[in-house]
Image (cartoon, grey):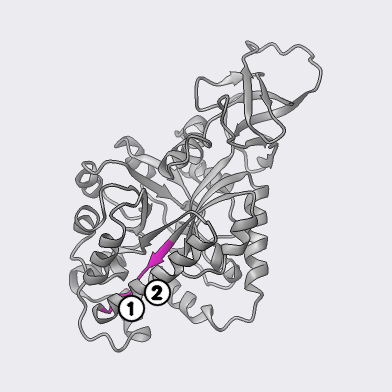
């Protein structure tokens, strides 16, 4: 058995505990949680830390396979330019992609991430995931605006799903974004994912998306014409709301990713969809569009919020803690307890993994993370706050 204590413990299963004691098995399973009433007497084998213990972090959106693009993409030029850079570099950079993936996995492990929804366009991350301490849910992403190639793209992703299945890796097929999928392909995805428990889609990441859907013009259209000159006619959804409400199965937990330019009208129109989660990746949004999502609006509307890091192509790190620092900087009225909830229990629920992850309760194995150098009086993160794994 192991025993851990700290100045405060966020359990997500009850009120904040001051100087409580967590008992775990050697494998990290929670045995008991003792509330000392704030007065901790010296006790054999208890490790005490001057900080806050929280459950392991949940990363609800990552692109591990793009880790080799770290420091390669110019920041701040908008989504269309970002996508063109990614497409240009994918097959031209002479880098060790496998080592970059392994290094990124190690970074997330050391950063306290225990559960991750990772976007896949290939099988390049599968071996690392098989051996990782992180539980990965691989989201096999489909995209393609050429209606004539819809069957081809669907068959490609089904082959990738078969590979994941043979390796016994949890996975789901998901659409990339409303602006990047033809209607015939979106409907094929819907047919093949009717029994999904989890789905995900990039949503309102850029104002360029609505321009493309409404008029088939703008920077995104220009990028398509550059890379896909053979597409003569585009049959794509006419707007984001119809795509989400009509073309994605309602049986799944749906994670809308980014939401940088979402408006109140969108939120209200989507409130009728059950099991909807809004994933924030603030550092990526600043990197690509130099804009933060309307977090206060989403929170005020009672949206279920989760946290993601996106990829190292659009972020300097894969740290959930750094995402929380950014959110606190821009939205200081949001409590630390709320931020921790978004990064732990909400993410676990979104990924259907809250039986094990997300809260510190007997019988669970959520991982334990220590936050040090915190403003304990005001319960605020500091620029120098650090994270380390206890379990």
| Residue 226, placed above or below residue 75 | below
The magenta-colored residue range is 140-146
Q: Can you tell which quarter of the image residue 149 is in?
A: bottom left
**Residue 24 location in percent, x, y?**
68, 28
Q: How many marks?
A: 2
Q: Is residue 380 visible?
A: yes
In the rendered view, does 160 fall on the left or right side of 25? left
Task: Say which quadrant the N terminus sits in.
Answer: top right
Q: How much space separates mark 1 and mark 2, taking CA atoms?
A: 6 Å
**Residue 346 location in percent, x, y?**
44, 38
Residue position for label 2? 156
Residue position for label 1? 152
Residue furthest out toward the right: 44
Q: Secondary structure at mark 1?
A: helix
Q: Secondary structure at mark 2?
A: helix
Neighbor class of circle 2 (other Cα within 10 Å; few <14, some 14-19, many 20+) is some
- Residue at the image point whose x is 53% and y is 72% from the top: 73
Magenta stretch containing residue 141, yes or no?
A: yes
Magenta stretch containing residue 158, yes or no?
A: no
**Residue 95 location in percent, x, y?**
65, 77
**Residue 137 location in percent, x, y?**
49, 53
- Residue at the image point whose x is 53% and y is 37% from the top: 357
- Residue at the image point whose x is 29% and y is 89% from the top: 230
In the rendered view, does 84 fall on the left or right side of 54? left
Q: Can you tell which quarter of the image residue 71 is in?
A: bottom right
In terms of depth relative to the viewer, which is nearer, 366 or 308? 366
Label 1 with label 2: CB-CB less than 8 Å: yes
| Residue 125, placed above or below residue 148 | above
């Amino acid at each position: 058995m192991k025993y851990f204590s700290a100045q405060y413990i966020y359990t997500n299963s009850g009120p904040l505990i001051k100087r409580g004691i967590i008992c775990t098995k050697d494998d990290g399973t929670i045995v008991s949680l003792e509330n000392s009433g704030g007065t901790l007497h010296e006790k054999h084998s208890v490790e005490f830390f001057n900080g806050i213990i929280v459950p392991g972090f949940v990363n609800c959106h990552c692109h591990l396979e793009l880790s080799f693009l770290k420091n390669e993409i110019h920041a701040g030029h908008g989504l269309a330019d970002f996508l063109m850079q990614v497409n240009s570099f994918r097959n031209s950079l002479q880098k060790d992609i496998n080592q970059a993936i392994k290094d990124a996995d190690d970074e997330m492990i050391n950063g306290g991430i225990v559960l991750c929804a990772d976007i896949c366009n290939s099988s390049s991350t599968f071996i690392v995931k098989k051996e990782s301490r992180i539980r990965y849910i691989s989201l096999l992403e489909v995209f393609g605006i050429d209606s004539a190639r819809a069957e081809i793209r669907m068959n490609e992703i089904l082959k990738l799903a078969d590979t994941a299945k043979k390796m016994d890796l949890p996975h789901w097929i998901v659409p990339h974004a409303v602006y990047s999928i033809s209607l015939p392909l979106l409907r094929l995805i819907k047919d093949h994912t009717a029994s999904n428990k989890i789905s995900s889609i990039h949503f309102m990441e850029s104002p360029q998306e609505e321009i493309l859907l409404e008029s088939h013009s703008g920077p995104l259209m220009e990028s398509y014409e550059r890379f896909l000159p053979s597409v003569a006619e585009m049959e794509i959804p006419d707007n984001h709301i119809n795509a989400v409400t009509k073309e994605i199965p309602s049986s799944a937990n749906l994670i809308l990713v980014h939401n940088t330019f979402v408006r109140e009208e969108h939120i209200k129109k989507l409130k009728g969809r059950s099991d909807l989660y809004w994933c924030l990746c603030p550092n990526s949004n600043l990197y690509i569009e130099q804009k933060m999502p309307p977090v206060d609006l989403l929170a005020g509307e009672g949206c279920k919020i989760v946290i993601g890091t996106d990829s190292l192509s659009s972020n300097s790190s894969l740290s959930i803690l750094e995402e929380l620092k950014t959110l606190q900087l821009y939205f200081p009225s949001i409590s630390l307890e709320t931020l921790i909830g978004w990064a732990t229990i909400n993410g676990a629920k979104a990924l259907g993994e809250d039986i094990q992850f997300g809260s510190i309760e007997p019988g669970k194995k959520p991982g334990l993370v220590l936050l040090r150098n915190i403003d304990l009086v005001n319960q605020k993160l500091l620029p120098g706050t650090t994270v380390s794994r206890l379990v």
